[in-house]
Image (spheres, rainbow, N blue to C red):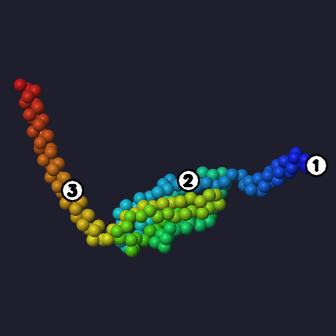
Amino acid sequence: MFDKRLFFLGLLIFTLHLKAQTDTGGTPNLKFDVDTADFGVVADGDSVIYQFWFTNVGQSDLIIKQAWPACGCTHPSYTQGPIKPGGRGYVRVVFNSKGFAGHEMVKEVIIINNGKERYARFKVKVVNEQFLKEVEAYKKSTQDTDKKMSKKEKRKQKREARKKKREAQQ
């Protein structure tokens, strides 16, 4: 007859043996300072560079094996070599916006390491250069108007203050 106790004892020994082989004293884990960056508005053809800084919050050395870009427009580079627990590293992302005018997008870089996969994301809105010049001209014209309005508001406030002072004296 089949002895269940012997089966479970064998299963326990096998499980402990597997755990001993795979246990490396903890796993590495990277934690980004900022995992999603907003590049804002970028002119078509411009390149934007951002460094995603991270800390190894795990209990063993972190080694980045690869950083996969979302497309050919993104070129990542990263800290080489082991990063000790508590150590810092970066994933540098260069985004070339050529050919993306009129698009608002979210792109990702997949970081493959000896722990688990992580994602660094960035958002960007690409516009053509003429549109960017028009926006800058508009901002400048509204700043001039705001300065004029603020002088008028100051005069109005002074008049109201004098009026209140006269009413208080009467």
Image coordinates of residue 99 in percent, x first then y, are 39, 74
For the residue marked with disc 1, what is the amino acid?
A: Met
User: Where does the image place residue 45, in percent across and percent down from the top left?
Assistant: 37, 73
Q: Which residue is mark 2?
A: 31
User: In the image, what residue type sits under mark 2?
Assistant: Lys
Q: Are marks 3 and 1 in contact (CB under 8 Å)?
A: no
Tell me where residue 120 appears, x and y as whole percent: 51, 60
Earlier in the chain: of badge 2 and badge 1, it is 1
Q: Earlier in the sequence, mark 3 or mark 2?
A: 2
Disc number placed over residue 143 in the picture, else none: 3
How far separated are the C-alphas under marks 3 and 2? 41 Å
In the image, residue 97 sits, relative to residue 53, either above or below, namely below
Q: Residue at horizontal 37%, vertical 61%?
A: 40
Disc 3: CA contacts within 10 A as few (<14), some (14-19) or many (>=20): few
Quarter where residue 155 is shown: top left
Quarter holding residue 68: bottom right
Q: Residue furthest top?
A: 170
Determine the residue positioned at 74% across, 56% down.
22
The residue under label 1 is 1
Classify the position of the C terminus by image quarter: top left
Horizontal side of residue 136 vs 124, given as left or right = left
Q: Residues within 10 Å of mark 1 (few under 14, many from 20)?
A: few
